[in-house]
Amino acid sequence: MEPKESASDSGPPEEGHHGKGHQNALERALHAARALILADLEASDVARADIVSLVEAAVTHRRWWVGEWPEGVAFVDGLVAQDVQDALLERYGRWPVCPVCVGADFHALDVEPELGEEPHWVCGKTSTVVARVGYLGEKL
């Protein structure tokens, strides 16, 4: 007598980027990116409801983007950070303001690498790495 198949064993195996496993990994990556950006917004004391809505819009856009290019899931943290930074610039001004350069020349930090894993906030004028995306609170 053969053992019965359990519910988790039934059905076709998950394959490619359309499988449930990929969808779960995508959602985990998006939730992690959202949490990292919210942490940086909190650290900068700018996590108001209207700004959190910009984060949600960026996450929604990147969900579609990764659906089109599944290999891009590893880059979501930096891309969501850049999307939020761009949206904030259009509506409110530069964010996050560079804590390295003090004086009248206020400028925002850059996300580097622009398309890569483990993105960091970097001062573009001095090439100083300030913090990993999501960890500005340790540096501000």
Image (tube, rainbow, N blue to C red):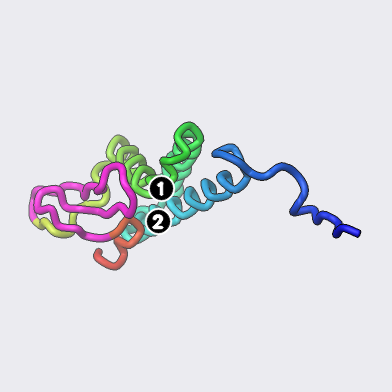
Residue hosting label 2: 36
Mark 1–mark 2 CB contact (< 8 Å): no
Q: Observer-nearest residue: 71 or 58?
A: 71
Give the residues in magenta. Answer: 103-131
For the point 44% across and 48% down, the residue is 52
Give the distance between the C-alpha atoms of the residues marked 1 and 2, in whole angstroms: 14 Å
Residue hosting label 1: 74
Does 38 sit above or below residue 68?
below
Give the main secondary structure, helix, strand or loop, of the magenta stretch: loop
Report x, y in % for residue 19. 61, 41
Q: Quadrant of the C terminus?
A: bottom left
| Badge 2: residue crowd in 10 Å (few <14, some 14–19, many ≥20) | many
Q: Is residue 128 magenta?
A: yes
Q: Is residue 52 magenta?
A: no
The three-letter amino acid code for the residue at tag 1 is Ala
Report x, y in % for residue 104. 8, 50
Report x, y in % for residue 81. 34, 47
**Kind of element beneath mark 1:** helix
For this orientation, the residue located farthest to the right is 1
Nearer the observer, disc 1 or disc 2? 1
105 vs 138, left or right, is left
Q: Observer-nearest residue: 100 or 113?
A: 113
Residue 45: mark in rendering: none
The three-letter amino acid code for the residue at tag 2 is Leu
Q: Quadrant of the N terminus?
A: bottom right
**Kind of element beneath mark 2:** helix
1 vs 57, left or right, is right
For the point 57% across and 44% down, the residue is 23
Report x, y in % for residue 3. 85, 59
